Image (cartoon, grey):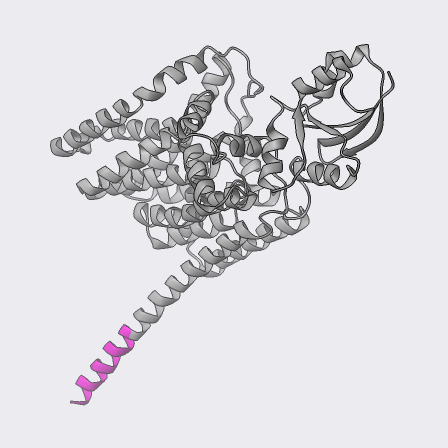
């Protein structure tokens, strides 16, 4: 009787221990999610929109028709992000906050799915470590606070890979349906989304002998539907192929070293993460063929995402930039997480975790990430002109097509009347402009391109520069 009571107590203690252990783990997941979300929300509007963000806002202005949003975006990129941004602006208001919050939402969902992908590929601890690294990752935080497509691209790259893995290893048709939806969404978000599908195809080819005939049949049907879905984009892709020059320069062969640093922004973390990636190979060597297959999945992800755009940039028009390669970030983070999991001694593992947490926060603090301006401060330009334009001098926007400052002025709900550069040309020629007028500029020296200035005498009375965004009060001397 006594022995049976002891066994019962031991059994109850084991249940309690497992319950507490499970809940402790879940608490850690929730805590890391909250930290990651807070780091993406904190001081969200401290930085002004810059030219790329204002272009996004201009296209997705809720006053624009749906067809305009689609076809204007297709001149340079797939339209899904701009359409979703247009929907957000239409429902929640045309403000800076709404545009940025949409990226925060995508970045926060990325945290959930990097955990799920790590758990599905390896185990829940790899998922937890990946969540930790992604939550504190500078690159992910930055693009989660920018009104551009990169946060959505990151999210869809993880989601599509997650459902691909779910179907490949669990063989449930519902996962294949979700995969088709997510990979097509990837295509319609950014052209680098095609690289995700490319690495999935290559991974299938590596494992063709392990796939049953039924699964292969489903995959072939899925791939046909996916490829067919790209037909509406083909004309635009072909037109982009005709572009012979672009602002992006040809990459050096060691570009990936620079990009790796761009992802983490800390030389110390570069070394730590590089070591953990190398250490993960130890687990690769000592594991089963089935588990090695999962390593290959990550390696193929990285190789395809780097090599294809690199070769394209070398032999044709360059398109490789570090922000476009945000699609490769999840694979790198998962390898780092795997290296961390591979460390056997708990005290050594905790040392590395504390180093990662400490130096991630140290970098955010020492770089003054949330307060030091890193973008063109267009907002400051508009506020400066509004404050110093008591006599209602004409204000001319000379950037791009001359309507981006007007878009920002509308978002900020300010009453500044802004004319475009074509009106400036006409007013100067006909002498309709005031003796004094404002020119607002940004991104590059657009004023130097105003050729008609050479035939007239002007004097700069005041000039305000906000990180390559300018407000200039000009006096006409003619």
The one of 135 and 5 positioned closer to us in this rendering: 135
Residue 9 among magenta residues = yes
Residue 186 among magenta residues = no
Q: Residue at position x 55%, y 21% from top?
A: 251
In the image, farthest residue toward the left: 214
* Residue 410, x across and y down, in percent: 59, 37
Image quadrant in which you'd find residue 448: top right
The one of 264 and 340 positioned closer to us in this rendering: 264
* Residue 188, x across and y down, in percent: 37, 29
Q: Is residue 145 visible?
A: yes
Report the number of discs: 0
- In terms of secondary structure, what is the magenta stretch mainly? helix
Quarter of the image with the N terminus is: bottom left
* Magenta region: 1-15
The one of 46 and 186 positioned closer to us in this rendering: 46
Q: Residue at position x 75%, y 32% from top?
A: 471
* Residue 434, x across and y down, in percent: 79, 24
Image quadrant in which you'd find residue 425: top right
Drawn side of residue 201 relative to residue 397, left or right: left
Residue 352 vs 163, above or below: the answer is: below
């Amino acid at each position: 009787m006594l022995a049976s009571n002891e066994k019962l107590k031991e059994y109850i203690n084991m249940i309690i221990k497992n319950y507490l252990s499970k809940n402790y783990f879940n608490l850690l997941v929730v805590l890391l999610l909250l930290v990651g979300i807070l780091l993406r929300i904190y001081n969200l509007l401290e930085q002004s929109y810059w030219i790329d963000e204002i272009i996004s806002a201009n296209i997705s202005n809720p006053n624009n028709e749906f067809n305009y949003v689609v076809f204007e975006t297709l001149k340079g990129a797939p339209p899904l992000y701009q359409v979703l941004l247009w929907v957000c602006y239409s429902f929640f208001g045309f403000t800076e906050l709404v545009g940025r919050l949409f990226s925060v939402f995508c970045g926060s969902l990325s945290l959930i799915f990097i955990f799920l992908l790590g758990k599905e590929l390896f185990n829940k601890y790899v998922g937890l470590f990946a969540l930790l690294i992604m939550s504190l990752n500078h690159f992910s935080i930055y693009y989660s606070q920018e009104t551009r497509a990169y946060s959505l691209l990151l999210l869809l790259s993880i989601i599509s890979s997650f459902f691909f893995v779910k179907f490949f290893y669990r063989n449930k048709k519902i996962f294949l349906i979700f995969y088709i939806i997510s990979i097509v969404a990837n295509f319609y978000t950014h052209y680098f989304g095609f690289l995700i599908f490319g690495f999935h195809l290559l991974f299938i080819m590596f494992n063709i002998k392990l796939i049953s005939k039924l699964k292969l049949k489903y995959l072939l049907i899925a791939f046909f539907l996916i490829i067919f879905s790209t037909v509406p984009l083909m004309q635009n892709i072909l037109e982009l192929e005709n572009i012979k020059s672009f602002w992006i320069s040809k990459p050096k062969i060691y570009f990936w070293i620079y990009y790796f640093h761009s992802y983490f922004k800390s030389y110390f973390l570069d070394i730590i993460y590089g070591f953990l990636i190398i250490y993960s190979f130890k687990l690769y060597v000592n594991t089963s063929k089935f588990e090695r297959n999962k390593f290959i999945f990550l390696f193929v992800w990285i190789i395809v995402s780097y090599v294809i755009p690199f070769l394209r940039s070398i032999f044709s028009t360059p398109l490789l930039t570090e922000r476009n390669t945000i699609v490769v970030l999840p694979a790198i983070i998962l390898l780092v997480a795997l290296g961390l999991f591979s460390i056997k001694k708990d005290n050594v593992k905790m040392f590395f975790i504390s180093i990662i947490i400490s130096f991630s926060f140290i970098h955010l603090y020492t770089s003054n990430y949330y307060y030091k301006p890193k973008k063109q401060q267009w907002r400051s330009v508009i506020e400066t002109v509004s404050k110093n334009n008591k006599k209602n001098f004409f204000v001319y926007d000379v950037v791009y097509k001359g309507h981006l400052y007007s878009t920002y002025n509308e978002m900020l709900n300010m009453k500044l009347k802004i004319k475009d550069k074509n009106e400036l040309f006409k007013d100067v020629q006909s002498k309709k402009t005031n003796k004094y007028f404002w020119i607002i500029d940004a991104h590059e020296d657009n004023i130097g391109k105003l050729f008609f200035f050479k035939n007239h005498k002007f004097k700069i009375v005041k000039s305000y520069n906000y990180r390559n965004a300018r407000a200039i009060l000009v006096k006409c001397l003619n």
